[in-house]
Each structure stands twice: as C-alpha cells, then as structure tokens.
Image: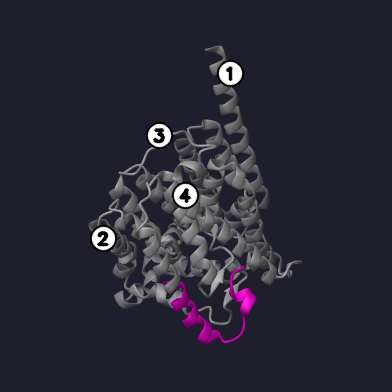
Amino acid sequence: MNQEKKTKKSDLLFLVLITILAVAVRLAVRTFVAEDWSVYWSDWLTRLSEGGFRALADDFYDYAPPVMYILYFITLLPVNAMTAFKGLCCLLDFAGAALIGRMVTECSGSRKRGYLAYGVFLFLPTVILNAAVWSQCDIIYTLLILASVYYLMNNRTWMGMWFYGAAFAVKLQTLFIFPFLVILWVRKKVDLKHFITIPVMYFVGILPAWIAGRPFKELIGIYAFQGGKDRWSLSIKFPNIYQIIGNNFFLDEYVKAGMLLILGILMMVMFYLAYQKVQVTREYVILMVIFFGMLTTYFLPHMHERYLYVTDAFLLIYTLLRPKRFPLFVTASFLTVVGYAQYLTKQPPLVSYGALAFIQLFLLVRIGLDLWEYIHDPGNILADNVEEGREILR
C-alpha cells in the first residue's frame, strides 16, 4: 500500500512538473510574430474589431467560419489578440496531450506509457512551434479528430461521428483520414446514418456567418476556394512525391493527375482492406488513421508543411504501443520540423526536399507493411506491448 502511494505521488509530481515546464517553454516563445499573423490574422482581427459580428458577411477570410468566430470573440477581450489566440491554442495543446495519454493508457493498459505520451506531445517541436510560435490552430481540428477516434474505439459511434463532423467543419484536411471511416462502415462498425453528422456539423459551422450576411453559396464553397489558391507550387515545404518528380513544373497537369492518382490508389487500398477478415481493434483503427493520413498527403498536390500534424499525433500513440517503431515517430517529427523551420526562418534547409521525400516514402511504406502484417497476423504485431484480450470494436 505504501509503495502504491509513493508511485501515485511520483506520477503526480511528474505530471505537475512536466506541465509547468511545458507552460514555461510556451511563454518563452510567445512574442514571436510570424508572417502569417502580420499578413493575414492581424488584418482579419482588425476587420472583425471594426465591423463586429456583421463583418463575417464579407469575403476577406478563406478559413472555415468557426475559426473566424474564435477571432471575433478574441476581439471582445481586453487583452492582446495574438496572446489570447496563442493562449487558447496552447491550452488545447494540453487537452490534446491529456487525450493522447488516455488513449495510450487504455490501449496499452499502462498508465506510465500514458503519462509519457502526455509529456512527449507537449514537448514536440512541431506542437510548440505550431501554436506558441507560428500562431497556427491545427490543434483545434486535431483535438476533435482525437476525440472522434477515441469515442469510436470505445463503441460510442454517434459521439465519435459528431466530433468528426465538427472537425470537418473546422478544417478540410480532416478528409485525409476519411477512408478509415469507410472501412469501418464496410465492416459494419459504423452505419450509413452516422455520416449525416458531417453535413449537419458543417451547416452548424457556417450558420452564424450566413446569419451575419455572407451568401450561402460562398460558405458552401469556401473549401473549394482554399484548394484553388496555392497554384504556384505543387508542394509547399512538404516532402512528398512532387519534390521528387518536379515541384514547379506541369502545374495544371500534375494537379489533375495527382488528384486522380490518389483517388485510384485509395479505392484500391479500401477495396483490399474491405475484404480482409481482421478483428477491428483499437490498434487497427489507429494504424489505419496513420496510414491513410500519410498516403493521402504523399500524393495530393498543394500540401503544406503542417498537414501531417494529425498523423504525427496518432503516430505517437502507435509507437508508444509498439516501442520498436519509436524511431519512425522521431523521423516523422524531424521531417515536419524542417518545413516549419524553413517557413519561420526563411532559410533553405541543409537537406534537399527531394531527399526528405524519399525518407517520407520509407515511413509510408513501413507503416503500410505494419498494416499488412496486422491484417495477416494481428495477434503478433503488437504482442510485445498490448495485453491479450484487448477490447474489440463491436
């Protein structure tokens, strides 16, 4: 009993100290003003501050309306806008870390691994740079996706799908992992009726902007507008196939071909997975999310350096369930940091993006092989770290 109390106290001390340090490191970098903030975000805030809620009727923003609602509420606060926005996103960093820790604990049966997951996520360079330095908000839709997968893994299907719909209402990149839901539907873990949550939550997300006066047609097509604005390059500091075959050539041809290529690849992969008689466990779901996130971004054109944020979060979960794969997580995080660093410092990387693209391809193939091994020998791939009798999705 005394030993158990000592263990709990040491665990609590670890959580408290790691949280304090994570707060401190974010405070240390909070004053950095990124180009995105000075060019876009500050202008949006000025318009919202001057025009109030009715300013949402204008077409000056290309982000999903829910993000603009956050900015609008920030204009009502008696604090520095950038500090408030960064503070909110950093607060969500801690919520995301806590949820990742809980998922690792439930999947592995080990609280210590869950605590480690919590700490690692908070100190990931990309997580710190994204919100505290860059003033980006990728943690918002990532947290919603984490909640979606968490509830789906625990057989709370409606709750999981509402969270996924909310994530889609915030960020189009939610679709990168959509194929895993198709597989769950084919395997009768999700019903067709559950997908109604996606358009419903999207409508709820645009409703206030519609009430403010922005045309419904514009709000429905805001994601289409996002997809058409980055036509000057096939890959924006992202290590995918276009860094190998030519990033600034045949823009129109490669964009069309790339879209059709990834759709064809996804159809073949989903067709194959749909016919595999494999137990749909929590680990299988996590592996699918990682694989589809990596696969989609590797072949889609116009990918940004931040578009693996979700995948990196789930890769952390996976590698703490399977420690032998932890080097994959470290490598993936390094690749993302390179893109972040080039944007923030305006300095070219020491390693070419073509070389980084081959490393990213290796990661994709390795995760793909893990998925293959799981399908054909699910009892062996995670036998070294997950207790037998892990819960299977019903």
> In the figure, 194 relative to 319: above or below?
below
Say left or right for 106 vs 43. left
- Vertically, is 132 above or below 361? above
Helix, strand or loop for disc 4: helix
Q: Earlier in the sequence, mark 4 or mark 2?
A: 2
Say whether residue 257 is magenta: yes
Q: CA distance from mark 1 to mark 2?
A: 49 Å
Residues at discs 2 and 3 in contact (Cβ within 8 Å): no
Residue position for label 4: 374
Residue behind mark 3:
389
The amino acid sitting under disc 1 is: Lys
Residue under label 2, please give it: 196
The image quadrant that residue 272 belongs to is bottom left
Q: Cα distance, mark 1 to mark 4? A: 38 Å
Q: Alpha carbon of mark 1 to alpha carbon of mark 3: how far?
A: 30 Å
Mark 4–mark 2 distance (CA, rounded to whole Å): 31 Å
- The magenta stretch spans residue 370: no
Q: Nearer the viewer, residue 236 or 75?
A: 236
Q: Which residues are magenta?
A: 239-263
Frontmost of labels 1 and 4 is 4
For label 1, the SS is helix
At mark 3, the secondary structure is loop
Which mark is nearer the camera, 1 or 3?
A: 3
- Quick one: label 2 or label 3, which is nearer the N terminus? 2
At which x and y percent is residue 338? 68, 62
Q: What residue is shown with label 1?
A: 6
Closer to viewer: mark 2 or mark 3:
3
Q: Mark 2 to mark 3: distance in Å?
A: 33 Å
